[in-house]
Image (cartoon, rainbow, N blue to C red):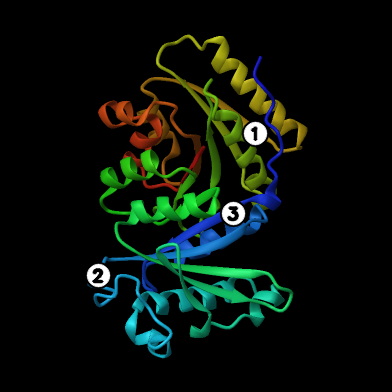
């Protein structure tokens, strides 16, 4: 019998959004802010710049002497200042956030990165992080250091490399934005099978559906015409969980190649939620996994839950 999904403790969640530029990161930041508000999670913002050259040889060695010229010395700080302004626009009801000002006096070096600590009057903090180096490696370090539960990342044209790197090496759940269109009312599509990650996917899906009012579908795919007890049990448990919360759910059972079926069914109007693979990194590299292959082959937003 499948274990019933337990409630997510939203107050304890920490999300991290990666931004790259003012020009390309606005959709990512907007979705990161939305998802964080859905889960009532804290939201960090990180900018990862190229090593040495973008830091003008500084190797993250900002000093109190040159912080007065922060906007000239490091363009990443300009991006983080922009991110703070955007977060204020996206959350106009947040009075504490509105009071926070970006100030170079709040820039510190800590744990191999530059940390912008923005205090408000009640003592809580907003943190903006600036790192240098390879994107996935620096994100991994930041997630491990601060214990983030979810990394929110924009799409990339080099999808094959990105898919392998993100899913194999980041220790958190991962939301890859890809071609997210805020004008589209997405349907949530949960990929349900007998893996241990399915119950977590159902929890995340239910909370998003409750907050955003998006229709929910579950999809179970079998390579043969027979659906085993594990698949059917997982689908029944998922349906009961949604029913108990008063959330309507459509369930689909299809046969064929799992990844190809996922991709064709998702089309361009679904927000996909799926569990991370339980294969070890070597097997994922050699043979791939459902999350990796799905991320490679579709442009819809995908949340991969660990």
Where's residue 201, x and y in %? Answer: 57, 35
Q: Residues within 10 Å of mark 3 (few under 14, many from 20)?
A: many
The residue to which callout 1 is attached is 249
The residue to which callout 3 is attached is 14
Q: Which of 117 and 304 lies nearest the eye of the viewer? A: 117
Where's residue 76, x and y in %? Answer: 37, 74
Q: Earlier in the sequence, mark 2 or mark 1?
A: 2
The residue sitting at 30% across, 61% down in the picture is: 133
For the residues labelled 3 and 1, the Cα–Cα distance comes to: 28 Å
The residue to which callout 2 is attached is 52
**Secondary structure under the numbered disc 2 in the rendered image:** loop
Q: Which of 111 and 233 lies nearest the eye of the viewer? A: 111
Where's residue 41, x and y in %? Answer: 64, 56
The residue sitting at 38% across, 42% down in the picture is: 169
Residue 237 image-quadrant placement: top right
- Pointer 2 with pointer 3, Cβ within 8 A: no
Where's residue 186, x and y in %? Answer: 54, 48
- Pointer 2 with pointer 1, Cβ within 8 A: no
The residue sitting at 44% across, 62% down in the picture is: 111
- Foreground mark, 2 or 1, reads 2
The residue sitting at 53% across, 62% down in the picture is: 44
- Foreground mark, 2 or 3, reads 2
For the residues labelled 2 and 3, the Cα–Cα distance comes to: 29 Å
Q: Residues within 10 Å of mark 2 (few under 14, many from 20)?
A: few
Q: Is residue 48 above or below residue 228?
A: below
Q: Earlier in the sequence, mark 3 or mark 1?
A: 3
Q: Residues within 10 Å of mark 1 (few under 14, many from 20)?
A: some
Q: In the rendering, which numbered label is found on residue 37?
A: none
**Secondary structure under the numbered disc 1 in the rendered image:** strand
């Amino acid at each position: 019998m499948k274990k019933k999904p337990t409630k997510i403790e939203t107050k304890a969640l920490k999300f991290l959004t990666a931004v790259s530029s003012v020009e390309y990161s606005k959709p990512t930041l907007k979705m990161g802010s939305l998802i964080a508000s859905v889960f009532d999670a804290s939201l960090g913002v990180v900018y990862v710049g190229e090593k040495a050259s973008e830091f003008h040889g500084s190797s993250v060695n900002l000093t109190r002497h040159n912080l007065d010229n922060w906007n000239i010395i490091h363009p990443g700080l300009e991006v983080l200042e922009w991110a703070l302004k955007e977060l204020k626009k996206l959350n106009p009801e947040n009075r504490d956030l509105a009071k926070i000002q970006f100030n170079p006096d709040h820039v510190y070096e800590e744990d191999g990165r530059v940390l912008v600590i923005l205090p408000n009057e009640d003592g809580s903090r907003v943190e903006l992080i600036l790192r240098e180096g390879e994107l996935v490696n620096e994100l991994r370090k930041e997630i491990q250091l601060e214990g983030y539960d979810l990394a929110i990342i924009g799409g990339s044209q080099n999808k094959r490399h990105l898919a392998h790197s993100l899913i194999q090496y980041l220790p958190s759940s991962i939301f890859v934005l890809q071609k997210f269109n805020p004008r589209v009312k997405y349907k949530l599509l949960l990929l349900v099978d007998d893996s241990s990650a399915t119950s977590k996917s159902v929890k995340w899906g239910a909370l998003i559906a409750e907050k955003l009012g998006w229709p929910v579908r579950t999809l179970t795919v079998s390579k043969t015409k027979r659906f085993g007890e594990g698949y059917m049990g997982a689908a029944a448990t998922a349906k009961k969980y949604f029913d108990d919360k008063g959330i309507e759910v459509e369930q689909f059972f299809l046969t064929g190649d799992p990844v190809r079926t996922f991709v064709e069914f998702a089309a361009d109007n679904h927000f996909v939620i799926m569990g991370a693979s339980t294969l070890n990194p070597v097997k994922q590299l050699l043979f791939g996994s459902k999350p990796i292959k799905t991320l490679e082959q579709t442009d819809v937003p995908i949340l991969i839950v660990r």
